[in-house]
Image: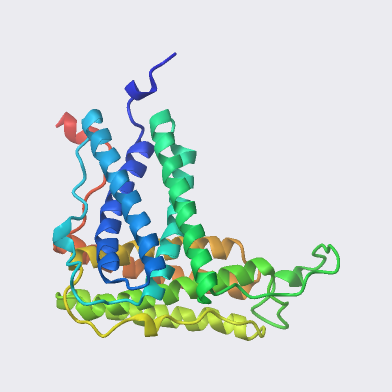
Amino acid sequence: MENQSEIRLTAAEMSVLWTQYINDTCGICFNSHFLEKATDPEVRSIIEYTLTVAKSNIEFLQEFFKKEEFPIPFGFTEKDVLPEAPKLFSDTFVLMYLRQMSILAMAASSAALGLATREDVVAFHKKVLQAAVKVQDLTRRLMLKQGTYIRPPFISTPDKVDFVEKQQFLNGIFGKKRALTAVEITHLFMNVQTNAIGKALITGFGQIAKDEEVKQFLKRGKQMAQKHMNLFSDFLMKEDLPAPMSWDAAVMDSTSAIFSDKLMMFITSAMIAAGIGNYGISMAASPRKDLSFRYASLIPEIALYAEDGANIMIKNGWLEEPPQTDDKDQLMD
């Protein structure tokens, strides 16, 4: 039988392993500060577990990269965080943030499993997925226990199975709009919630950022997140459905440097990328035209914001370059 570990890594495998390494070094920085400042023992235990998983992943990946003669990414180090700095976010928000990160980790590791071929890479991402599911379970149970878990809206159970008979089902721009479907409600709720988390996070970042250009970028992101929250909440409230709460009160008044501007720009850029993906999926899952048009109109706005963030990172030498294919024309020169 062919020795799988002797087969070269595919571009997909390089991509997911490289990304995992960068994300875990970032996670170690964040959770080091969270652990230092958390006062709730149950929250602390979840942070400790998340931190242990990230460190284990880094240890595995460093050995893996050495064996493959693959350059170890730089990522983030202890220079990007000051764990003992004053607390920036409440324990409740940290719990919500870890839950959101576990959702992104589940999606990323599931995609990685669909792309990976080598057994050792598959085994690693199975482990990553299992850990992400465990963090999701731990955070959800604790939030339910504490009364901080925000459930999506309830709607009436259908009386019977129906099929769409009229094209009016797709309307939404003119005339009477049909009621929102359960799928559309789910995406609206999720997008309000993710923007609320993002707004709170970059509000805190804006308080401690050192570079003025970064501060202005984060301020713009805060305003954009609030605008999007209002737009999506309005769709829900017009149907007499509740929208998720904001997390503004979870941000403390600290202005001390905790995270490097490089780290905060990376996290903000990752959130923007996730937001673009969420809007694309939401648009595809929302047949009502006013909804799909709204998502389509917001994606270019976020994409432009993402480009501006990338330019700031490039200007400051913060954007680490992912693996690339060979430029055959250049090699021939």
The answer to whether 212 is drawn above or below residue 167 in the figure is below
**Residue 121 location, quadrant:** top left
Q: Nearer the viewer, residue 323 or 61?
A: 61
- Quarter of the picture containing the N terminus is top left
Residue 163 as seen in the image, left or right of residue 24: right
Residue 291 as seen in the image, left or right of residue 299: right
Q: Nearer the viewer, residue 142 or 310?
A: 142
Whether residue 183 is visible: yes
Measured as percent of width and height from the top left, residue 219 is found at 28, 81
Residue at 15% across, 63% down: 315
- Quarter of the picture containing the C terminus is top left
Measured as percent of width and height from the top left, residue 117 is found at 44, 31
Q: Nearer the viewer, residue 200 or 226?
A: 200
Furthest toward the top, the residue is 1
Residue at 24% across, 60% down: 29
Furthest toward the right, the residue is 160
Measured as percent of width and height from the top left, residue 160 is found at 86, 65
Q: Nearer the viewer, residue 138 or 281?
A: 138
Residue at 54% across, 71% down: 144
